Image: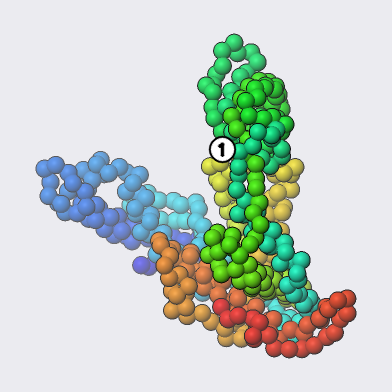
Amino acid sequence: MQLTNVQAAQKEPYVWELQVEVPADEVQRTTEAVYRRLSRSIRVPGFRPGHIPPGLIKRWVGEEQIRQQILEDLLPEALMIALKEHNLEPIVLPDWRDVQFAEGQPLRFVAEVITKPEVKLGEYKGLTLKRTKVQVTDEMVQQSLEEVRQELARYEATDEPAQEGDRVRVRYQVLLEEDEEPREQWQSGTFVAGASGWTPPLPQNLVGKRQGDEAEFSFSYPDDYPNPQMAGKTVKVKFVVEGVLRRVLPELTDEVVQEELGLDNLEALMEEIKRDLEMRLRRAVRASETAQAEEALLKICQVTLPNALVEKFTNEFLAETETSLRRQGMTLEAWLARQGKTLDEYQDEVKQDTERVLRLRFILEAIADREGITVTDEEVQQALEGEQDVTEEDIASVRRRILEQRVMNLILTTAQWIEEIEGTKETEEEEREDETPNP
């Protein structure tokens, strides 16, 4: 494809605007190719595939659909050629706008191209970082044993009044005050007595009730309740307690451990708990060290982010958040009201987080380039083994994650560590290859 005209103008550092024109004859060739493709793929009574006249195809498929297919064929190829002419390498898919397209006329469009910003690296080797040595204590083991007891708890029926945390089976009915007849039939459910977060607060009204008790209470929905049908309304809740189940915690004996957990004895359980705690502590330490290294890199390295890139990622995140909330039956405005934030405040937070993530990403990529750190296709495929419906975005994300892990390993293995042990500090340089796993 030959382009009639390509003009490039820099809007801001690392952001270019391309004005591209595709000649009419190229547009015509692509149009004819689209008609030939459609002639072979569609079925029109009375015509053999491949022998359907363009006019009939237009009526059968629709002009807008044909137009979209022509543009889908032309725009990416024209953009790729325009980028090569000006030696531009976009880091995100360029957005195009102001598309001018008519049959027999040249195709014109404008594309915004964002290129990778320059990174000025500081001395990233030998960073001074803090490390706190941690160890599994008896208190931690005992707490974990108590958590195991909680998980093995059983619920047994009791005739005593319900206490907070008991499970209570009830039949209940919700009525609006102005209704003479109930809008809902009796329903059944099991609630945790005293639990918060329910509207109306039925669980909180179950404390002190025993099997066979009947009671009712009134509740007024706030005026700003998210469901407009219930906002400001008052309801009456009637309920009948059908049973109270109380939590009974077992003693952790060898027999209980064998029967419930499949381990030899209580000692074996404690050893497993210690190993798990040590692994969790190592992960926590690694996370703390990584966070310190990231903050240090952000201070010593300089990156000028294109505003267009920050805005693009910020807007995409906001749109995804709004879509996710809508699927849950909530608007972004209602969710922000619960968080006590305005839309402007939330946008500022997202923008700041986006800037941090992007700056760190470009810094780590620059270090990888300088150090010759790479990730092979085989390593990416191995990491994605077993995954279904893998997209190009998934592949890029995995490749970036492995690369960033390797760069961070380099940062941590070359760091100077300030040890903090029981309130004392000592500085030492050491290799951490044994403690820093390879990705």
At which x and y percent is residue 232? 69, 23
Identify which residue is drawn at 57% across, 86% down.
Answer: 372
Instruction: Specify few, some or many for label 1: CA neighbours under 10 Å numbering under 14, 14-19, or 20 or more.
Output: few
Residue 179 located left or right of residue 298: left
> Under tag 1, what secondary structure?
loop
Residue 285 located left or right of residue 48: right
At which x and y percent is residue 128? 79, 81
Q: Furthest residue to the top? A: 180
Q: Quadrant of residue 91?
A: bottom right
239 lies above or below 307:
above
424 lies above or below 210:
below
Near-viewer residue (251 or 406): 251
Near-viewer residue (83 or 302): 302
Identify which residue is drawn at 57% across, 83% down.
Answer: 373
Residue 83 located left or right of residue 416: left
Q: Quadrant of residue 381?
A: bottom left
Identify which residue is drawn at 23% across, 45% down.
Answer: 57
Asked whether the viewer can see residue 81, the reply is no
At which x and y percent is residue 220? 71, 24
Identify the coloring: rainbow
Say what amino acid the circle numbered 1 marks. Answer: Gly
Residue 164 located left or right of residue 316: right
Instruction: Identify the residue under disc 1.
Output: 329
Q: Quadrant of residue 272?
A: bottom right
Asked whether the viewer can see residue 398, the reply is yes
| Quarter of the figure that contains the C terminus | bottom right
